């Protein structure tokens, strides 16, 4: 791989070269399912009344360079992360504390917690949960050290509806196709071998996680066939990302029925068996004589407040949570993915108190050291000593430039960056500031590439509750 | 497979079942490259100015039933057809006679022939040609026999730009996916095993034909890398059908460079080496330092008069034909695919004259018998005795109902059916009637299915000239 900072990569393209490359990418993407349904800003709904069009997924024309040692570091730490988050999601007391700290300013987190509390009161009947996790990293260059070092630093850890696992397998194949067919043709050509592109088997891996959970769910006592439900948002445009997992399951485990169910239809099409187990039964809308016992609920919805427009949506979540289906994820696993948990786990020990991390991973182990290397500085925004110090930085028009302020939400769209932080904070009641965290911006090395973020995927079937 | 005529297939669908099935088909198609670029009647050009949208290929929701014995019959006769048409395309004298018979009323055929004559005069330098053939059949039910028999009858034999080989592989996979996942869910369900769907390996087979031709072309004397050119029409919408062959070549033979070249750009981007061989050299437009010796020209254009809007297009065809590249097809192979050839080959011997077929395939062999079984009645429209009799049928308002009148063109769009034949003929100068053939309509058995046509694909590298 060309040096990350040499300026020789990606190669500069003449207009004709760029046009030809784009044409190849457009066709390959559609020809291989690297597609999305277009947003109305691209194809007006009136122009496509039956919603039949698809477009290629936006991709970079060249794979983004990523230092090999950082890639290896990210892959190597993943299993430890999986185990860490599986442990966190089993530690209700720890999560209760987190909710207490952010719940004052975050109604959504509070509502999720309340659902868990209600189910806990009557008793969970399903000890298993499935985690399909995505850990996001950026390369950080430590310029303060005398020999600048490159390390991956974790941006966030996703425990619900983590997307792009299905499509990333195809993006990887696209770049491999281009490396074989197109890059060698450029005037500033890249030799095929120079790129050293790793395989990306994410779709297979995630599907295998769902298959494992399905097989971990015993045959129905009630005589029904077992099934997997993909719980989706209405009008989902990123449907092929999800479908690729479904197609992979159909290929690897053709006997597993998989159904897509819109979150808004949960109470319409599912019921709980009147048993102590409370099995989740799915009645096929198009053919109500077919009733399935849901072994796995794979949530690609339910992560954002907008998925809960009213009480019925909360009732639906409660309905699912108290069911016997293996949830991917449970509410506790979902809460383990909050930024506040990330902030607490990444906060080092002080003289008097051990680190929170040491509760879950033994100190002085290689695993713990690997985790610490991947952490960046994240601060609370509460009334603690560290929180008060963070507030000062966040409100300072100079110091705030090095930070991002994050709420307890999925997706980067809710983040507040740099100079926008002080005015934003002033618009929020001070008693809610504690529901945010302040994160040091990661400094990727300077490069001409469009992106230097990477993501590692993993799966873990963890025991919860 | 449900009986072809039982009425139980395809199953009747409730509206919800049909909607769910369509949704699955729409997503699977895009997720697996079973796609086309939309026509402007579906997505207005103004709504998609950068031409990024794709839509699913139109397919039937259920595989069309096809009697097993007919499928076996079509597969079994294919090799004989390949050999027959390879022989026909090597028989210049025979083709000269065909051109003489239709050329009076068909300028296009005459122009193609003239190109061949010019190249012949200076001498072909390439003895090999590649045929990627598609033979189209319908099931014919002979109701005149006491026990009605089902047989495949050939509709036509395509020797140039035969399409849908790439996509048909995916249509077959779609129906296999539906047979596993969707059909068992219907109220009038079809058991999975009941369908007995054969594998369709057309894309692999056609690509392997191109790969074979590439390897049959020796390494360049001039020191260039060899390449394959897909010669396409400008603004091709059926691009994924073609791309799938390209992707298959990239997968199976990653060292073979494949380029798409618009027919209109042939003279701009290719030259002939000033050698006795006249190698075809392709200069990569986006990077003119890259020059390739074209081993194979795979024509997905040049089959219709509209591909030749002026003299330059004919010059381009001459340029290609006289080059050393292996043509798929040569002009002679293209001419072998005319309806007139089909009519002549399918005309039985009379008392005094042997059949034309016996020139190519020995009479009284199983191969010949298989061919005869697949022929339907096709008549000349010339001044011969048979032709005069056919003209009578074609002009009779009753008798014409059993026929289709076909010109020497690719694609069904030019055919004239049943009652439209008499007025059409009256609009054409009588001296041109001989350029048409009159074909008995094939009588498929009555069934509820939308289509009972099938197609078998094959490839053959034949020696021509």
Image (cartoon, coloured by chain):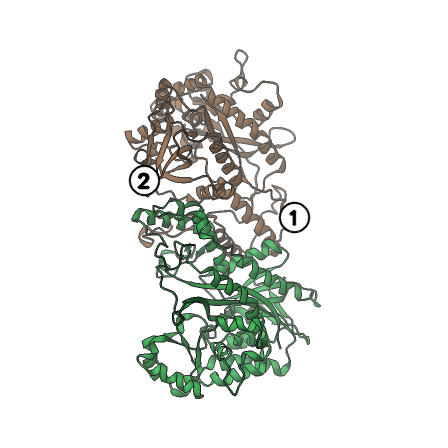
Chain colours: A brown, B green
A41 on left or right of B328? left
Residue A130 visible in the shown view: yes
Quadrant of the frame with the N terminus of chain B: bottom left
Q: Residue furthest front?
A: B146
The chain to which mark 1 is attached is A
Eyeballing the image, is A417 above or below B86? above
Marks 1/2: CA–CA distance: 55 Å
Rate crowding at label 2 as few (under 14), some (14 to 19) or many (20 or more) other CA atoms within 10 Å.
Answer: few
Eyeballing the image, is B289 above or below A243? below
Identify residue for label 1.
A193
Most foreground residue, A460 or B457: B457
Most foreground residue, B115 or B65: B65
Eyeballing the image, is A425 above or below A207? above
Single out the mark in the foreground, 1 or 2: 2
Measured as percent of width and height from the top left, residue B357 is found at 54, 78
Q: Residue at x 43, y 29 (%)?
A: A326
Eyeballing the image, is A18 above or below A212? below
Identify residue for label 2.
A288
């Amino acid at each position: 791989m060309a040096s990350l900072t040499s300026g020789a990569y990606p190669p500069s393209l003449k207009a004709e070269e760029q046009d030809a490359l784009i044409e190849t990418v457009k066709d390959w993407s559609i020809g291989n399912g690297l597609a999305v349904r277009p947003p109305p800003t691209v194809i007006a709904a009136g122009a496509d009344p039956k919603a039949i069009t698809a477009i290629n997924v936006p991709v970079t024309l060249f794979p983004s360079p990523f230092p090999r040692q950082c890639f290896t570091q990210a892959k190597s730490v993943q299993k430890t992360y999986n185990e860490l988050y599986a442990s966190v999601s089993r530690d209700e007391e720890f999560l209760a504390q987190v909710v207490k700290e952010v719940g004052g300013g975050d109604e959504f987190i509070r509502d999720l917690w309340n659902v868990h509390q209600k189910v806990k009161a009557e008793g969970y009947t399903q000890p298993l949960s499935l985690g399909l996790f995505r850990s996001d990293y950026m390369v950080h260059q430590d310029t303060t050290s005398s020999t600048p070092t490159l390390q991956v630093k974790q941006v966030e850890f996703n425990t619900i509806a983590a997307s792009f696992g299905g499509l990333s397998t195809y993006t990887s194949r696209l770049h491999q196709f281009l490396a074989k067919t197109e890059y060698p043709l450029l005037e500033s050509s890249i030799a095929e071998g120079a790129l050293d592109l790793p395989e990306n088997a994410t779709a297979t891996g995630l599907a295998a996680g769902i298959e494992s959970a399905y097989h971990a769910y015993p045959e129905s006592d009630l005589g029904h066939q077992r099934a997997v439900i993909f719980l989706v948002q209405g009008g989902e445009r990123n449907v092929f990302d999800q479908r690729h997992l479904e197609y992979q399951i159909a290929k690897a485990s053709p006997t597993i029925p998989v159904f897509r169910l819109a979150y808004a239809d949960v109470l319409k099409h599912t019921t709980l068996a009147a048993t102590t187990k409370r099995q989740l039964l799915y009645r096929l809308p198009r053919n109500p004589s077919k009733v399935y016992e849901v072994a796995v609920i794979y949530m690609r919805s339910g992560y954002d407040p907008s998925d809960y427009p009213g009480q019925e949506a909360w009732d639906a979540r409660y309905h699912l949570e108290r069911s016997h289906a293996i949830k991917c994820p449970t509410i506790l696993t979902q809460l383990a993915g909050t930024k506040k948990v990330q902030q607490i786990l990444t906060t080092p020990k002080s003289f008097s108190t051990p680190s929170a991390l040491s509760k879950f991973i033994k100190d002085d182990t290689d695993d713990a050291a690997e985790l610490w290397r991947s952490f960046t500085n994240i601060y609370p925004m509460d009334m603690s000593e560290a929180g008060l110090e963070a507030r000062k930085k966040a409100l300072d028009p100079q110091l705030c430039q090095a930070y991002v302020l994050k709420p307890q939400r999925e997706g980067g769209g809710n983040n507040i960056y740099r100079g926008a932080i002080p005015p934003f904070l002033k618009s929020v009641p001070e008693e809610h500031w504690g529901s945010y965290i302040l994160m040091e911006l990661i400094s990727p090395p300077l490069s001409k590439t469009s992106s230097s973020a990477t993501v590692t995927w993993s799966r873990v079937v963890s025991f919860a509750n």
